[in-house]
Image: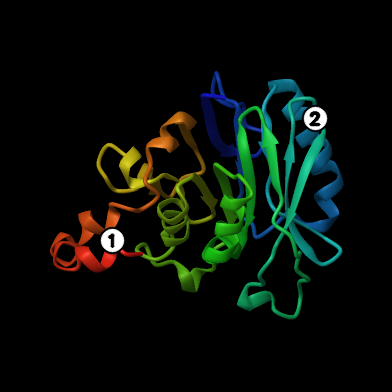
């Protein structure tokens, strides 16, 4: 595995040529329960027809919010449940208790459900279990629509853990990466935009060149790092 091509698109839209991984974008919090069975059937047909790996929209089963992964044969090969409730669903949702990493020809994937992207311990465990690509699917409420805030989850995850993070939500789509791998040093391969469409090539061999934030502090605050270099080097 050297390269993976990711495409975010509206549900069941034809992916761009050479796409390996499709992520469905949807403006709803999750698929309505009554629509879930036919939706999953069509997802299976879509993955098989276009020969892609597919992460559909979020859905609820037995009071748990899930993401899943279809392989190019149309089979579901992985599930991941929400690990931390959103404040608006404290009394409505049960939570999962495990971080699942799925090894595929397009990378070791972690399906990050909704607010779990804001929990560093979840992302660290995913990294320790071998993840190199995180798919973050979120629903962001209107009161949280703050441009400088809504993308901090995927950006922080990429800088702290040293993997790629594809963010898909009703508010933005973006791809974050360790800042060393971005041409402008921003930590975004694809800048956050209010769009349901995104196309990006990910080169996993480049992750080996990432220091996972080691020199990021020097870029952000070089005077501080120079002054306290002796102390920092003892960590």
Res. 74 image quadrant:
top right
- Contact flag, marks 1 and 2 (Cβ < 8 Å): no
Between 179 and 65, the one lying in front of the other is 179
Q: Residue at x 76, y 64 (%)?
A: 96
Where is mark 1, residue-wise? 233
Residues packed near mark 2 inside 10 Å, few (<14), some (14 to 19) or many (20 plus): many
The image position of residue 213, as x and y in percent, is: 36, 53
Q: Quadrant of the N terminus?
A: top right
Left or right of residue 205: residue 38: right
Left or right of residue 213: residue 70: right
Where is mark 2, residue-wise? 74
Mark 2, secondary structure of its residue: loop
The image position of residue 76, as x and y in percent, is: 80, 38
Between 195 and 63, the one lying in front of the other is 63
Q: Quadrant of the C terminus?
A: bottom left
The image position of residue 212, as x and y in percent, is: 40, 49
């Amino acid at each position: 595995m050297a390269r993976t091509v990711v495409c975010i698109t509206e549900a069941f839209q034809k992916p761009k040529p050479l796409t390996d991984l499709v992520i469905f974008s949807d403006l709803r919090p999750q698929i309505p329960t009554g629509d879930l069975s036919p939706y999953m059937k069509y997802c299976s047909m879509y993955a098989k027809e276009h020969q892609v790996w597919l992460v559909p929209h979020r859905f609820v089963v037995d009071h748990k919010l899930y993401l899943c992964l279809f392989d190019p044969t149309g089979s579901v090969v992985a599930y991941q449940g929400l690990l931390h409730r959103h404040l608006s669903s404290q009394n409505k949702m049960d939570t999962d208790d495990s971080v699942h990493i799925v090894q595929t020809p397009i990378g070791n994937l972690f399906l990050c459900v909704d607010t779990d992207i804001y929990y560093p311990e979840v992302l660290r465990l995913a990294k320790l279990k071998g993840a190199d690509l995180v798919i973050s699917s979120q629903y962001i409420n209107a009161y949280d629509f703050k441009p400088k805030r809504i993308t901090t989850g995927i950006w922080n995850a990429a800088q702290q853990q040293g993997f790629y993070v594809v963010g898909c939500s009703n508010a933005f789509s973006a791809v974050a990466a360790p800042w060393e791998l971005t041409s402008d040093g921003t930590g975004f391969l694809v800048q956050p935009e209010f769009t349901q469409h995104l196309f990006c090539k990910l080169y996993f061999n480049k992750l080996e060149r990432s220091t996972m934030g080691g020199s990021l502090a020097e870029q952000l605050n070089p005077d501080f790092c120079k002054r306290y270099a002796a102390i920092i080097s003892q960590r």
